[in-house]
Amino acid sequence: MIRIKAGVPRSGRPRTNPRPRRRGLALALPTAWGVVAVGYKFGCPLAEQNGLGARIVTSAVFFAVGTGLILHVRRALLRELRQVRKVAGAAQSVLLRPLPPRLAGLNIAAAQLSADRGASIGGDLYEAVATEHGVRVVMGDVRGHGLSAVGTAAAVLGSFREAAHDEPELGRVLGRLDRALARHLRERARAEHPSRGGQDPDDPVAEEFVTLLLLEIAGDGELRAINCGHPWPYVLSGASVEPLSRADPLPPLGPFPLPTDLVAIDCGRLDPEDSLVLFTDGAEDARDARGRFFSLQEALEKAVRDQQVSPQSILRTIFTGLLHHTNGRPTDDIALLVLRNEGQHQRPFSGARETARPAPTHP
C-alpha cells in the first residue's frame, strides 16, 4: 500500500504555498511608498523649510506617493475583478452548458446578451437534449436578477435534464419542473426566514415565477409544445417568418397551480431547411431612445432575405440589430436559441446527449 503524504508531490519536493508570497508582494509596494514618504518628511532637510520651492517639492513627493498607492489599489481591484469574472464564467458554463452544434439532425446555436456590462450569469435558461422521445428543448426566463434568479434557473434546468429523458409525455415533464420549482422556493423561504422553526410557509415567494416554453421535435419533424407565459418562437420557412402558434399560453410557473389535463399543443412540422427561433422577452421589449420597441419579426425577415440562413448568421443579425436599436445599452437580459432542420434526422440514443464542439454561448 502506497501512502502519499499530503502536500508533498511524488517528486519528493514539498509544495510551496503561493499565497504568502502574493500577500508579501501586495504589501511591499505600499510599504515602500510609506517609507519614502516618512523618510522624506523626517529625514530630508528640504521638508523642514517653509519656502515656496520646498513646499512645491514636498507636494510633488506626496502627490507621487498618493498616485502610487492609488495605482496599486486599482491594480489589486482589477485582479480581483478578473478573478470574479472567471468564477462567474465557470458558474455560467455549469448552469448553461454549451450546446452541441448539431443534435439529431438539428443545427443549433445559442447566445446571451446581458443588460449588465461584464455580467455572465442571470435568470435566462435554455437547454436542448436528444432523448428517445425526440429532441426536447426548454427556454425560460426567471423573474428578477442576481443570485436568487440564478438559483431558480439552476433548479429548473436540473429537473429538466432528468425529466426530459424519464417522462414519455411533455405534460409530465412540465409537472416535474413545477414541483422542482415549488420545492426550491420552499427551501429558499425556509433559509430566508429561519425564525419559523423549519416549517413550510404558506406562500414561500409570492412574487417569484418563471416563464417557460417546452418543445418536442420528433424524428420526422413533428412539433409539440407547452407554453407557460413565454413568447412563442418564430418559424423561418424560406422568406416567411411566422409565430409557431397563436394559442393563449398557460400562466407562468409559480403563482398558479397547473391544470390537471396538461396536453402538448400540436404545432405542425419543422420541415428540412426550416428554422425555429426561441427567445426571451428582453428581445421584443428592447427600446430605443425614443421608446420604440425592437421588432424581432422584422429583423428575422431581414436576416432570411439578405443572406444565407444559418443559426449563427441569425444570431449575428439579431444581436447586431438589438445593440444598434438600444445604442449598446439593453435594459434586460436577452437569450436566443436557434434550431435549423438539416433534413438528416436520426433517432436519438436513449438517454444520450450528443457531444461535439461547443456552440458559442456569447454573441
Image (spheres, grey):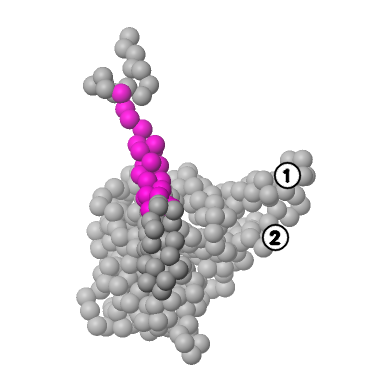
* Pointer 2 residue: 206
| Disc 1/disc 2 C-alpha distance (Å) | 17 Å
- Quadrant of the drawing holding the C terminus: bottom left
Under mark 1, the amino acid is Pro
Under mark 2, the amino acid is Ala
The quarter of the picture where residue 47 lies is bottom left
* Identity of the residue drawn at 68% across and 57% down: 205
Observer-nearest of 249 and 14: 14
* Pointer 1 residue: 194
User: Which residue in the rendered view is the most extreme toward the top?
Assistant: 1
Q: Position of residue 283 (x, y in %)?
A: 45, 74
User: How many residues crowd mark 2 within 10 Å: few (<14), some (14–19), many (20+)?
Assistant: few
* Identity of the residue drawn at 51% across and 87% down: 291
What secondary structure do most residues of the magenta stretch adopt?
helix
* Identity of the residue drawn at 45% across and 68% down: 50
Horizontal side of residue 246 vs 54, given as left or right: right
Q: Where is residue 281 in the image (x, y as percent from the top left)?
A: 49, 72
* Identity of the residue drawn at 28% across and 61% down: 107
- Quadrant of the drawing holding the N terminus: top left
Horizontal side of residue 361 vs 292, given as left or right: left
Magenta region, residue range: 14-38
User: Which residue in the rendered view is the most extreme toward the left?
Assistant: 308
Label of residue 70 in the image: none
